[in-house]
């Protein structure tokens, strides 16, 4: 599959084997069994890799499916308003809010407008960018979220740093989301960071699907670390 062809279609259940070695892509599985083929990105050590999702490059059909799935998961928490994390989380948050029947959503941002208050910001970092940023909430948006049941939405939860920044920014305004949602829960590296925040946060995370931390085998294929021993002993492999 060529790079621009990823994230464009959902495949039928069982179309791609999951518990095998993977050459270039990992098949994420939605709740209804449909699969989304994601490219594997090697980490700096060359030994480990992660499945990647760039939601604003996805087809409208895929974004619609992910937003529908996530909205269904968040509906149980009865959110009054959806807040989106920049940058890619904004694409998903807007669609989730619409599917929940909301008239609008509240976007957080990293671009400081002249009317912003620096006190309404926190430092922000993420796995996909190295430059220092700050996360802001537009002071004009505060009346929309104060005293409301809030759902905080991002596209992917990976290290947990972006979610922690969002929760910290909202906490400073006395706002505690009832749930955090994302399309993909990328491995479990985020779990300890959110556990440190208390309030049972890891259990209040909703995702459309989860993808594992992958490890490159001696055969050059990528394996789920938790499945690798069993798969290797069975001699199973895949070449997609």
Image (spheres, helix red, strand yellow):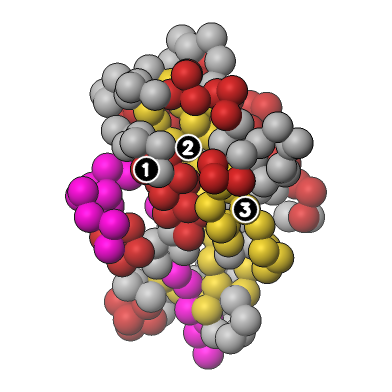
Q: Say which of 95 and 112 sits in front.
A: 112
Secondary structure state at the residue bearing disc 1? helix
Secondary structure state at the residue bearing disc 2? strand
**What residue lies at 41% left-to-right and 49% top-to-bottom?**
168
Q: CA distance from mark 1 to mark 2?
A: 16 Å
* Residue span colored magenta: 196-218
**What residue lies at 34% left-to-right and 72% top-to-bottom?**
227
- Say which mark, if any, is on residue 171: 1
Secondary structure state at the residue bearing disc 3? strand
Q: Say which of 18 and 84 sits in front.
A: 84
Q: Say which of 103 and 145 sits in front.
A: 145
Q: Quadrant of residue 116?
A: top right
Give left or right: position of 183 versus 113.
left
The crowding category of the residue bearing disc 1, from other C-alpha atoms within 10 Å (few below 14, some 14 to 19, many at least 20), is few
Q: CA distance from mark 2 to mark 3?
A: 18 Å
The numbered mark, 1 or 2, whose residue comes first in the sequence reads 2
Residue 6 placed where, x, y %? Answer: 69, 48
- Say which mark, if any, is on residue 134: 3
Residue located beneath label 2 in the image:
153
Q: Can you say which quadrant of the picture contains the C terminus?
A: bottom right
Give left or right: position of 109 versus 195.
right
């Amino acid at each position: 599959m060529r790079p621009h062809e990823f994230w464009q279609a959902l495949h039928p259940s069982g179309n791609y084997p999951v518990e095998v070695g993977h050459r270039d892509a990992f098949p994420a599985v939605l709740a209804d069994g449909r699969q989304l083929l994601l490219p594997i990105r090697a980490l700096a050590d060359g030994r480990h890799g992660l499945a990647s999702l760039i939601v604003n490059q996805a087809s409208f059909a895929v974004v619609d499916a992910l937003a529908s799935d996530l909205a269904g998961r968040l509906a149980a928490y009865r959110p009054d308003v959806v807040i989106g994390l920049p940058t890619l989380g904004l694409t998903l948050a807007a669609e989730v809010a619409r599917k929940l029947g909301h008239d609008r959503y509240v976007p957080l941002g990293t671009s400081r407008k002249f009317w912003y208050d620096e006190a309404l910001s926190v430092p922000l970092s993420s796995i996909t960018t190295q430059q220092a940023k700050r996360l802001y909430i537009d002071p004009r948006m505060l009346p929309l979220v104060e005293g409301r049941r809030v759902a905080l939405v991002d596209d992917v939860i990976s290290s947990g740093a972006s979610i922690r920044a969002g929760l910290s920014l909202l906490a400073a305004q006395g706002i505690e989301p009832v749930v955090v949602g994302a399309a993909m829960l990328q491995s479990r590296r985020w779990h300890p960071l959110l556990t440190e925040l208390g309030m049972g946060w890891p259990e209040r995370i909703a995702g459309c699907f989860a993808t594992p931390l992958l490890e490159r085998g001696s055969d050059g294929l990528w394996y789920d670390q938790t499945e690798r021993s069993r798969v290797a002993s069975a001699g199973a492999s895949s070449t997609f």
